[in-house]
Amino acid sequence: MKIMVFLHGTAIMQRSALGRTREERVRQVIDRDESIYDFVSYVPVGNAVTKMQTWNEQDAEIVYLSSHSRAEDVEKDRWVLMTHGFPNGWVFFCQNDDEYPDVAERVSPDILIEDDCESIGGEKEMTNPHLRPEVKAKIKSVVVKEFGGLDHLPDEISALESYSK
């Protein structure tokens, strides 16, 4: 079982979002708050670390999808993941002319967890809606509210596989 989790807005967020409502976090991105560019200081959204560790303990391979396209910024993501105790896993990102669906199709996860991209344009910025139909049929999509976290998702992978809002 391979679970791909989108990072920014889904599993991690800007440090200045701590203690703020989900709506305030979204507003920070819309307003281009300078804290959103301090990538090395990002923190987990809610109990994302614990949730993913729970899946990992059930033998799920956790991999990540970064919004960054520069290797040096992806290294910052890796540092944040390591610092906060996220499960070890590859961090994938768009290179050259890649788009998120290209990366997801190559990695071919069983489950793709991403947020609804509320602050940056919604569905047109998401991964799953743009997968080829034959690929989309093979990947279980789980969409969460941006900055809403993963806490509400099932702990059991079998329940996650059949999860619907």
Image (cartoon, rainbow, N blue to C red):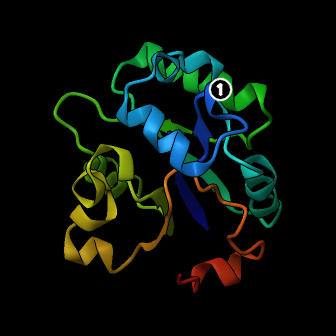
Question: Which residue does the image show at 27% across and 60% down from the upper left?
Answer: 123
> Camera-side residue: 51 or 27?
27
- For mark 1, what is the residue? 15
Q: Position of residue 76 (x, y in %)?
A: 56, 18
Residue 10 in view (yes/no): no
Question: Which residue does the image show at 21% across and 76% down from the upper left?
Answer: 133
In this rendering, position of residue 151 left or right of residue 65: right
Residue 27 in view (yes/no): yes
In this rendering, position of residue 33 left or right of residue 54: left
Q: Is residue 107 above or below residue 152?
A: above
Type of amino acid at the residue the image marks with label 1: Arg
**Callout 1: helix, strand or loop?**
helix
**Quadrant occupied by the N terminus:** bottom right
Q: Position of residue 79 (x, y in %)?
A: 66, 21
Q: Position of residue 146 (x, y in %)?
A: 49, 53
How dense is the environment of label 1, judged by Cα within 10 Å: few (below 14), some, or many (20 and up)? Answer: some
Q: How many marks?
A: 1
In this rendering, position of residue 10 left or right of residue 108: right
Q: Residue furthest left?
A: 97
Question: Which residue does the image show at 22% across and 39% down from the upper left?
Answer: 98
Q: Is residue 2 above or below residue 98?
A: below
**Image quarter of residue 44:** top right
Question: Which residue does the image show at 38% across and 25% down from the upper left?
Answer: 32
Q: Position of residue 80 (x, y in %)?
A: 66, 26
> Camera-side residue: 17 or 89?
17
